[in-house]
Image (tube, helix red, strand yellow):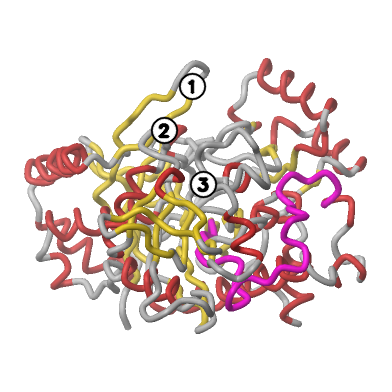
Amino acid sequence: MTETADNFDEMYDAEGGIRSGYAEYCNWYAEQEAGYLRRKDKDAEGSFRRTGITFNVYGEDDAEERLIPFDMVPRIITAPEWRRLTRGIEQRVSALNAFIHDLYHRQEILRAGRVPKRLFRQNEAWLPHMVGLTPPGGVYTHIVGIDLVRTGPDDFFVLEDNARTPSGVSYMLENRETMMAMYPELFTRVPVATVSDYPRRLAKSLAACAPDCAEGKPNVAVLTPGIYNSAYYEHAFLADQMGAELVEGTDLRVVGGRVQMRTTRGFEPVDVLYRRVDDEFLDPLTFNPESVLGVPGIMDVYRSGGITIANAPGTGIADDKAIYSFMPDIVEFYTGEKPLLPNVETWRCADEDSLKYVLDNLDELVVKEVHGSGGYGMLIGPTASKKEIREFREKLVEKPENYIAQPTLSLSTCPIFTRTGLAPRHVDLRPFVLVSPEGVDITPGGLTRVALKKGSLVVNSSQGGGTKDTWVLKD
């Protein structure tokens, strides 16, 4: 697929005019010399390299560490557009939290027949250990990333929900810091909402979720699998920015009914654990007995109300792409309202009629694994070879319940900076949402991912994509 007049471009209108949100940026851009912009582009790459802003790409044999590509042309969202998005995001996140609570308690939505029970039979993301357990403050999804795509001036869609351990917020923050360092004069000309206070807001939101046993200022720690994890940079970055301890499983132990961390002053209790370790590895006494990444006995402490785990174990059920297809019903069931942000049309391959349609139209659809992420294990029909389509067809026939399919959307484009000038590329957006008993807090911005290859629809960094700074304009 290539960019055509059918693609909505966020900077330019159909006649080639500049849209209002980009007007002042384009005035500034026109004043700059091409050589100056090229040098700045090179400087940005050097800054990311010195800072160590990398990610791991997992291949068949091992992981390769790469520098995350950064494009210096910002993605700009006007204040009215952002207000509309935030209303839809808040509605969806509130429904997700209510849905997860219901699944582990009365299961009213299943009783009502709005979501089929078969989706939870043998679903690895649903944890029986959470049945009847309500986390401190009633919050399951403390940090949520909602992936959005745009197809027109007023057409935004939710592509997927990330309610387990959403990543990428460090890139959002570093993108902004890099832009402010390179072009400080731009931020005096364009009124851009700040994102730099996200770590402070995260720390405040997590502290508000502390269990009743916390004394004084809650102790917050970030649990990482270690330096070989693809998102380790982000784990360390957020811990540092929050003023929290970065810990591994070996730094923690259960003492006196509390999870405690080793410090230079001895062991101290942890009130809130922002974990970046998957459910399976969180507690070897409850889940995978071979795990060395988690804390033996932490689930017993959690059940007794002795610690807050963010996000709560079992929230991964909301990341399930088969569940995603029912989100319009889920939103309406728990809020009494129609979704303000619609889903992308989705075919569940577990359904016989849907599977037939998908198999008949594989060359036109995007097919994804129900539990897939990072752009892995998916088929983009319009750009796939006959061999790839044939192999994917076999996978679908063998295990149809593992897949969903969606139409190939005409995603909006934003310009990127190239050696020959600006060129349109497809983008998506991941806003970051904080949830606590005090409410829902949405950072004005997010991570814009961009497909750097001409015509590509895959924005994931692991698949050749990059990132942009996201500007939300002030009123």
- Image: 175 above or below 366: below
User: Three-letter amino acid code at disc 3?
Assistant: Val
Q: Residue at x 13, y 72 (%)?
A: 188
Instruction: In this rendered view, identify the residue nearer to me: 436 or 274.
Output: 274
Disc 1 target residue: 59
Disc 3 target residue: 277
- Image: 87 above or below 41: below
| Residue 123 within the segment the image draws in magenta | yes
- State the image quarter where residue 46 is shown: top left
- Nearer the N terminus, badge 2 or badge 1? 1
Find the magenta span and give its range: 120-148
Disc 2 target residue: 464
Q: Which residue is drawn at 64% across and 37% down?
A: 289
Q: Residue at x 56, y 75 (%)?
A: 90
Residue density around tag 3, few if under 14, some if 14–19, many if 20 or more, within 10 Å:
many
Q: Residue at x 35, y 66 (%)?
A: 19
Instruction: In this rendered view, identify the residue nearer to me: 99 or 321.
Output: 99
- Image: 352 above or below 149: above
Quadrant (top left/top right/bottom left/bottom right) for the C terminus: bottom left
Inter-mark Cα distance, 1 to 3? 21 Å
> Residue 424, how many percent across, how many down?
38, 45
Question: For the view shown, which residue lies furthest in the front direction?
Answer: 256
Report the side of 294 relative to 341 (left or right): left
Report the side of 141 relative to 57 (left or right): right
- Mark 1 vs mark 3, foreground winner is 3
Residue density around tag 1, few if under 14, some if 14–19, many if 20 or more, within 10 Å:
few
